Image (spheres, helix red, strand yellow):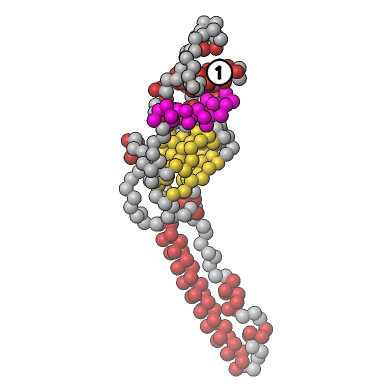
Amino acid sequence: MSIGNSSDGSSPEDDPNAPHPASEDRVPIGLALRRARIAAGLTIEGVSAATRVRVPIVHAIENDDFTRSGGDVYARGHIRMIAHEVGIDPGPLVEQFDTEHGGRPATTATPAAPLFEAERIRPERRRPNWTAAMVAAIVAVAGFVGFTAFHSSGSDGSSKDTAATEAGGPSASASSPSPTHSKKGTTAPDPAASDSAIAAAPRDKVTVKLSAVDAKSWISAKAHNGKLLFDGILDKGQSKTFQDDKRVDLILGNAGAIELYVNGKKVDDQFRSGQVERLSYTQGDPSVG
């Protein structure tokens, strides 16, 4: 027997004769979601499978119990995902939730980071840029080799021309292309681009790209000063890119469906479907910072 269902396979809240909370100025959030689910012909288990929100949480939300969601931020995400699945606009429900639960936290305040997030964010200190140093060294060596080859070829050509003129023969420059030009063509090629994808990202900013690959996911993104960059659903196939001077804070409602690039480099963390992740990234290599 599944949670929230009676022995005949139907939910008690699906019974039209079951008592509902007393109606006030507006319908409670849980009742609105329950009615929309029933009208759409869906079960609690079906909504749970589609949204990755566990059955007990869906059941609790339909009874206006948001304590199982783990906090107001997660409750808003659960309301949005369930509302999308049952076919109603989540906006009014989220506004109603904010009104009934003291409103959203001030966007200027930076939320306290959990322990694992604090471990991920290390003090910002300048690290040696080995990629730039290597490229500079290669360019210097290539320039020295080219300069040496150019002067060497110029000296050889001058001596050959002088010898031919003194012997009364035609000038070497008149009978064949200047060796100087041929030598220029053999100058060492420019150094190849760095294999690191981070080299292509701006070094003075934090760039985060999210792509919903396997399924949709609710996401929230904030700048280092707490400014809300995005808060909503990322449908399958959609991508969002966020940028900040110092740090980008993320909350992923369905982390297993997200492909994550930070500062041009793919993050290979093994997130599970339905898993909620709180992440923060700063400048540089995401595997280090």
- Quarter location, residue 250: top left
Q: Which residues are magenta?
A: 82-102
Q: Which residue is outermost to the top?
A: 7
Helix, strand or loop under label 1: helix
Give the image location of residue 230, x and y in percent.
Answer: 48, 40
Q: Disc 1 marks which residue?
A: 35
Residue 47 highlighted magenta (yes or no): no
Give the image location of residue 79, x and y in percent.
Answer: 49, 27
Residue at horizontal 66%, vertical 85%?
174
Q: Is the stretch drawn in magenta largely helix, strand or loop?
A: helix
Give the image location of residue 124, x and y in percent.
Answer: 34, 50
Count neighbours of disc 1 (C-alpha within 10 A) and say few if under 14, some if 14 to 19, many if 20 or more.
some
- Quarter location, residue 40: top right
Asked if residue 275 lies left or right of residue 161, the reply is: left
Q: Is residue 125 visible?
A: yes
Q: Is residue 2 visible?
A: no
Q: Amino acid type of disc 1?
A: Arg
Count of labels shown? 1
Query: Which is more toward the observer, 146 or 13?
Result: 13
Residue at horizontal 55%, vertical 41%?
239
Residue at horizontal 55%, vertical 86%?
159
Give the image location of residue 54, x and y in percent.
Answer: 47, 21
